[in-house]
Image: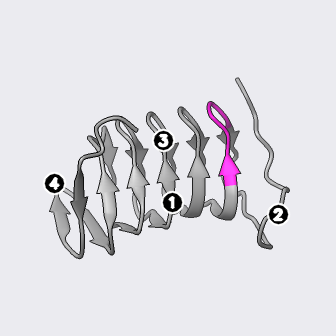
Amino acid sequence: MCGCGEITSRHTLKTGHILLVRRGHRLAKLHHIGEKVTAESSTIGSNVKIGDRVKLNNVVVMDSVSIGRNAVLQIISGVGATIGEICNLKDCQVGGMCMVASGAKTVEKGERGVSCLID
């Protein structure tokens, strides 16, 4: 999580797209931010790709993570993880360099049903 310096609270970051930031958000240098991304109480590492309409709530996203469009996340993700489109993940961890398939979702708190695929 190198480079996480600025804490932004209740402000909109202007990067060419809309990133709505609420309550104590920590943001490093991002590679790509999609449109209409919202984040609340989250820490985001450097070189992260975030797709359109992603909602981040109380997440820790390590460096070099890719998040597909329309994902709703409340997780901790490891370095280099890839999270597919339309995922709804809550109260779980995604290991470093793991891939979560598009459409994956957790149903209950702490569920272990999401698999990790390593290339």
User: Which mark is on residue 111?
Assistant: 2
In the foreground, 8 or 85: 8
What residue did someone put label 4 on? 16
Instruction: Provide the residue designation for mark 3.
Output: 62
The disc, 2 or 1, on the residue closer to the chain's N-terminal end is 1
Q: Secondary structure at mark 3?
A: loop
User: Disc 2 and disc 3: Cα gap in Å?
Assistant: 21 Å
Task: Tell me where the magenta segment starts and ends, as one range.
Answer: 93-98
Say few, some or many: other residues with alpha carbon within 10 Å of mark 4 (under 14 / 14 to 19 / 20 or more): few
Residue 24, image x, y percentages: 32, 68
Does dot 1 land on a helix, a strand or a loop?
Answer: loop
Q: Kindly identify the residue that appears in the image at 28 percent across and 37 percent down.
A: 3
Rendered position, 43 above or below 21: above
Residue 97 magenta: yes
* Percent coordinates x, y for residue 112 in the rendering: 84, 56
Which residue in the protein does label 1 denote?
Answer: 59
